[in-house]
Image (cartoon, helix red, strand yellow):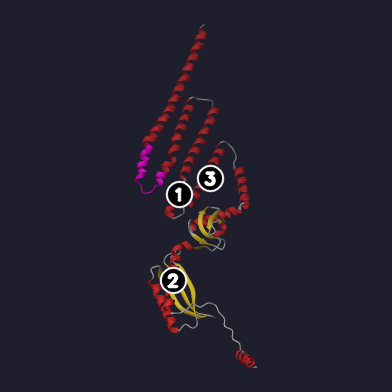
Amino acid sequence: MIETLTQTWDQFINLEGILWRLAVAALIFLLSLLVRKIFTRFIIVLMYKMTYRTRTGVDSAIVSAFENPLRALIVIIGIFLALAYLSLPPAFMGAVSHLLRSAIIIFIAWGFYNLAGVNLLKEFSEKLRLDDDIAEFVAKVLRFIIIALAISIIAQEWGYNVNGFLAGLGLGGLAFALAAQDTVANVFGGIVILMDKPFSVGDWIFTPTVEGTVEEISFRSTKIRNFANARVTVPNKVVANEAITNWTRMQKRQVSFHLGLTYNTPRAKLQSCIHKVKDLLKNHPGVHPDVIFVNFDRFSDSSLDIFFYFFTKTTAWGDFMAVKEELNFKIMEILEEEGVSVAFPSRSIYFENKLKTAENNSKTGQE
């Protein structure tokens, strides 16, 4: 009887100890939740206030990147401390310890993953005057590296030998690079285009391959809408290695042509026409005043050629054509006022036996 009571008491004491440990473990977990709440309400807010006073947004980005990982890490540490207080079997606690260290690695990688976002890199790209597409590309590369490093460290934490895997990955990467060398060349061509900025979206460009308006620039190819309204996709390695004429970035638009007058035009009339046309171009609001040439250039086969070389202020195609049309009508008006004619290709044929033929015809008529 006494032994039974003793056993019952020992069981009660053990049960009470277990319940007590469970209660303390639960209290530790609840305390971790309280710490997380305090961390969120006070510490994070205080850190944001401190970083708000600084001139750069990097510190604010760091706080924002690691805010959620730190919240989750506090809860994970609370769970680990609660389990450690329960005095569970060493094998189980060893696995929990590995899980805790893996979780810490994941949360650190999570923070750096957030930190390597486009918003932070855009701030650096603005200072370095880099394109937004480059910032996005760098962000993707950094995030890939962060994930790869996190997976490698976690694998080592669980006892896996990653040296062979990394060596195989290197050989596989080399084989992949050889197989995808055209794609890699296009990617680097895209980086060159984005950094050098020979053109932007919306520009009218001309290359030996294509001419048209740029619609999209990606890391593999450039999409161009040609004048037949067809969309042409050109690999970036082709565009990067070609001479590119960017018509949109013209500061002024060139006009160059010859105008031929007939050979019976008097010298005074020719000089008067040139003088009046020069005055027209110098006083026209659509003509750029820096370079204006109107000169008697050459004696052609069937005309006296006047050379015109000047620039319009506008570079837009429609406005450029309107200025040219107006100037052409004005030049025609000057030619009409001076009474001179525009020459057209012609050829005169002279016969040496013309008089002899006429004489024979007259004799035949007399007979």
Q: Which residue is mark 3?
A: 144
Amino acid type at mark 1: Leu
Query: Measured along the vertical axis of the image, is residue 190 above or below residue 44?
Result: below
Q: Residues within 10 Å of mark 1 (few under 14, many from 20)?
A: many
Q: Nearer the viewer, residue 119 or 324?
A: 324
The image quadrant of residue 348 is bottom right
Q: CA distance from mark 3 to mark 2?
A: 64 Å
Q: Amino acid at mark 2?
A: Phe
Residue 57 on the magenta segment? yes
Instruction: Point out the residue furthest to the front here.
Output: 367
The spot of residue 135 in percent (x, y) is 47, 50
Q: Give the mark nearer the N terminus: 3 vs 2.
A: 3
Q: Secondary structure at mark 1?
A: helix
Residue at 59% of width from left, 53% of height from top?
183
Pointer 1 or 2: first along the chain: 1
**Image: magenta residue range:** 43-61
Mark number displayed over residue 217: none
- Label 3 packing within 10 angstroms: few (<14), some (14-19), many (20+): few
Q: Nearer the viewer, mark 3 or mark 2?
A: 2
Q: Which residue is mark 2?
A: 329
Looking at the image, which residue is at 37% across and 40% down? 47
Could you tell me if the residues under marks 3 and 2 are in contact, i.e. CB atoms within 8 Å?
A: no
Residue 250 lies, in percent from the top left, at 45, 64
Q: From the image, tell me which residue sits under label 1.
A: 121
Kind of residue sitting beneath label 3? Phe
Q: Position of residue 206 (x, y in %)?
A: 52, 62
Report, in whole angstroms, how far the alpha carbon at label 3 lies from the one at label 1: 15 Å
Task: State the residue in front, 202 or 277.
Answer: 277
